[in-house]
Amino acid sequence: MKKYIEIGIGNRWLVRTEIEHEDGTETEVKGIDRPFRCKTLYVRIWIGKKVLVIDSREGFKITTKSRNKFKLIVGLSGL
């Protein structure tokens, strides 16, 4: 199970935890769900269909999504 704690604009809540289960399903929780063990820090900027991700572990990448959004997120990824 992976957890993503995100702070920023563009999501349903200003602070949220996204839990990714082993079967591929995801759950969103308002606030910070504990316990949490941080593995990486990232910044995600989503403008239109382009998403820029700067990750402390994986580096820099740009992806394209099918829907138009605006998000500015600082997040922690871990277990």
Image: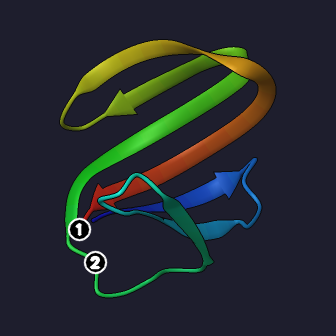
Q: Are marks 1 and 2 in contact (CB under 8 Å)?
A: yes
Q: Is residue 31 above or below residue 50?
A: below
Q: Earlier in the sequence, mark 1 or mark 2?
A: 2
In the image, what residue occupies the spot 50% across and 14% down?
A: 63
For mark 2, what is the residue? 36
Count the marks: how many?
A: 2
Give the farthest residue toward the bottom: 34
Q: Nearer the viewer, residue 29 or 52?
A: 29
Q: Nearer the viewer, residue 70 or 65?
A: 65
Task: List x then y, in percent, for residue 55.
Answer: 31, 34
Task: List x then y, in percent, for residue 32.
Answer: 49, 80
How is the protein colored in the picture?
Answer: rainbow
Residue type marked 2: Phe
| Image quadrant where one finds the N terminus | bottom left
Task: Indicate the secondary structure of the residue bearing disc 1.
Answer: loop
Badge 1: residue crowd in 10 Å (few <14, some 14–19, many ≥20): some
Task: List x then y, in percent, for residue 71.
Answer: 70, 38
Lateral position of residue 2 relative to residue 69, left or right: left
In the image, what residue occupies the spot 40% across and 51% down?
A: 24
Lateral position of residue 66 relative to residue 2, left or right: right
Task: Indicate the secondary structure of the residue bearing disc 2.
Answer: loop
In the image, what residue occupies the spot 36% across and 63% down?
A: 21
> Where is residue 30, by image quadrant?
bottom right
Question: Which label belongs to residue 32?
Answer: none
Residue type marked 1: Leu
For mark 1, what is the residue? 79
In the image, what residue occupies the spot 52% across and 59% down?
A: 6
Give the farthest residue toward the front: 23
Marks 1/2: CA–CA distance? 6 Å
| Image quadrant where one finds the C terminus | bottom left
Badge 2: residue crowd in 10 Å (few <14, some 14–19, many ≥20): some
